[in-house]
Image (cartoon, rainbow, N blue to C red):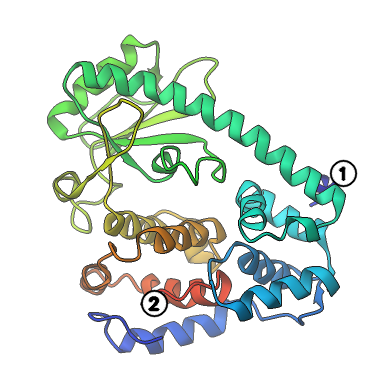
Amino acid sequence: MIGARRGSRAEGLPARDDLRARRAGERILPSRPSLRRVATASDAAWFLGRCLGHDPSPETGAELRDLLQRGDIDWLRVVALANETLLTPALDASFRWKGLSALLPGELRSYLETISNLNRQRNRRIVGQASEFFHALNRRSLRPILMKGGLHLFESDLEDAVMMADVDVLMAEEAFPLACGVLRSLGYVSFDEPQAHLHAVTFHRAGELATIDLHRRLGPQLRLLAPEDAERSAVAVPSRGLDLAGLCPTHRVLLLLMNYCLLEPQYWKRELPLRDLHTLAVLCRRYHRSIDWATIAQVVGRHSLDVFAWYRLALAAVAAVWLWRS
């Protein structure tokens, strides 16, 4: 069975970051393989990025189509990487979106469809689970703010492509104890007691697919992105009769970068965060006119988050999305 084996500079971005990005890229970006062969781990990372990329240029599309038709692709290696990074449903969705599914080997196409169908069913159950909590909050005149992957569950064209383990919800400090009480009234228990120094508390309920991570702050920090700023800039989320909000696109990008350089071991290991890169590519495709890159660059520069320049180069090279294309 296939799955068994393993442009121009943006306004506000300091010019020095371009040099830093190039230096970082020399160390950690995978080399580009031959157009005819995908055989190594580096090849697989490059190829997966190409498959998931949202570059609309005819040249990129023709190159990928030609490789699928005539190339020598180690699909076991590619699918193993997609499984490891939880990108298999996204890979299937990308092939369908680009009209390339018919070029895949039959067994591979069947495998991807099976994983996507199972993930779709799972996500719908998670939406139902989360909606129960959100309805209970709304009845108390509280509006939750969705973070991270939880937002994708309510974005219709993405709900099938993400694999979820938890639902992250931000609540205002004064509403946080009440929201904890609501979850307990629904049968949830917490892994930790909601102490003031904790930025979030994880709740679970027997038999459910996902945990609910209730946040009072956006990670173990206060200066990069304050919860008050996130609440003030939150945007309404179409939500089937629920009163929901979500982080604004600028804060979604900033949270991705912040989590990567503060919390993810991939940063220190200089490994490509393919799943986060794909999320960033999707955000750029959907909300490119709403993302304030100048503000992000200011925050990154103020707090010396060097990862921003690396992300820009890695996204362009691996996911084939040029952030600065107007």
- Quarter occupied by the C terminus: bottom left
* Residue found at x 52% / y 36%: 165
Task: Residue 152: give its label.
Answer: none
Q: Quadrant of residue 305?
A: bottom left
- Camera-side residue of 280 and 255: 280
Residue 183: give x, y in percent of width and height.
Answer: 33, 18
Other residues around mark 1 within 10 Å, as few (<14) / some (14–19) / many (≥20):
few
Q: State the SS at label 1.
A: loop
Residue identifier under label 2: 309
Mark 2 Cα shell of 10 Å, populated few (<14), some (14-19), many (≥20): many
- What type is the residue that disc 2 sits on? Ala
* x, y percent for residue 74: 83, 64
Label 1 vs label 2: CA separation? 40 Å
Residue 13 occupies quadrant: bottom left
Q: Looking at the image, which residue is at 34% across and 20% down?
A: 133
**In the image, residue 260 above or below residue 227:** below
Q: Nearer the viewer, mark 1 or mark 2?
A: 1
The residue singled out by tag 1 in the image is 1
Is tag 1's residue or tag 2's residue first in the polypeptide sequence?
1
The location of residue 271, given as percent across then percent down, is 56, 66
Specify whether 89 is left or right of 146: right
Q: Amino acid at mark 1?
A: Met
